[in-house]
Amino acid sequence: MKITRVRAYPLTSHAVWVEVEAGQVSGFGECYPNRADWATRLIADVVNEGLASALLGQNCEDIDRLWHLCYRKLTPRQGDKGPYMAAISGVDIALWDLVGKLRGIPVHRMLGGAHHRRIPLYASIGGAADRELDEYLAEVRAFQERGFTAFKVRTHWGEHRIDVDPDRDIEVLRAVRAQVGPEAGLGFDANNGYSPKTAIAQGNRTADLRLFHFEEPIAHHDFAGLAEVARAVSVPIAAGEQEYSRWQFRDLALRGGVDILQPDVLKCGGITELRKILYLADILGKTIVPHQNQATVGLVASLTVMSIWPFTLRPQEYLGEQPELEMLLDEPPRIVDGAWQLTDEPGLGLHVRASALEAASL
């Protein structure tokens, strides 16, 4: 069926949602968000001015062909990063949702079938650097009371602030471990916050904490440094939220030596590309735990793809509710006892309130 409409909505929350319509049916996707009105409009403009005209009249079921059409239209001169890949991601997710709705089947069935129906989550809790420890532990406790059994400490010292207070980071980690107990899952995200030498020291200091991963210990672009850290510590090293296409993840895995790949479906190229990165991880013997900081379309798209992972599924990232986005849906994703249940509704199973989406746009 031919595509009759493509529109990106830059939202006041700085999210960008994408609608693709065919046969009076709409599919919805999401692009990676930004933190300013101008940047939000920029990503929406890439869709509305850069991609929409090329997609109109195309068969919406040719999802992989359309991915490459978008990729070749946008990336030859500017490269496959940033707002271009975020725009492609949003369009791609919308196409999968649309075709699923038109066929009357869920996206996970279109992807080949789910190996997992209950998707466990970990509570990803930021601001450890700047918050009082009691306040931070109270948020951990709130997630515990909701049934979460896995948690991640995110330091957030800020951009370009390296090795600010490694002892403080260890203090928070040990306090969280003491609160959640020895059986709970615990991860640590340094947010690019250490030099390689300090990262190695921190990795060794946390050996007794049984971390499920040590995320972005150093600058994400320093593949040589990541490899040095990965060789020197026993805790698994995770990275990838700043990478985009499967080719970048190939280099991260082979040159960066990380144990866990962390693509984000809203910036790596959407469902189409995330599935290919899953296959890449399988071939290279890597684990995959996607980055995800959105609580609606992005979360469901990411978890739906991860449902087809044929191996043991590690808990997936969850930051908490986003009321400003959840109000755009008839029913937001339901998180029960620290997990999300896969749906068999057509597409991604989300029902967007068109009037609310329009009203929330910049």
Image: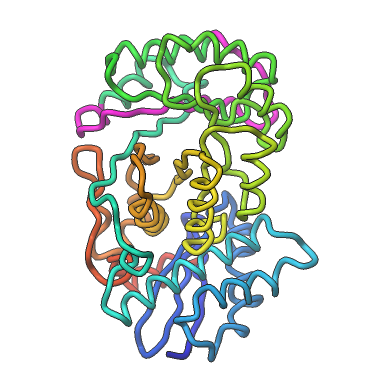
Nearer to us in this view, 68 or 24: 68
Residue 278 location in percent, x, y? Answer: 48, 51
The residue positioned 59% from the left and 33% from the top of the image is 258
Numbered disc total: 0
Residue 55 location in percent, x, y? Answer: 57, 83
The residue positioned 57% from the left and 49% from the top of the image is 35
96 is higher (above) or lower (below) than 264: below
Looking at the rendering, the stretch of residues picked out in magenta corresponds to: 142-167
The residue positioned 53% from the left and 47% from the top of the image is 283
Q: Which of the image's four quarters has the N terminus?
A: bottom left
For residue 110, what is the image quadrant? bottom left
Nearer to us in this view, 129 or 91: 91
Q: Is residue 233 left or right of residue 297?
A: right
Is 17 contained in the magenta span? no
The residue positioned 57% from the left and 13% from the top of the image is 202
Nearer to us in this view, 13 or 223: 223
Residue 252 location in percent, x, y? Answer: 65, 41
Residue 121 location in percent, x, y? Answer: 32, 39
Way the structure is coloured: rainbow
For residue 200, what is the image quadrant? top right
**Farthest right residue?**
77
152 is higher (above) or lower (below) than 334: above
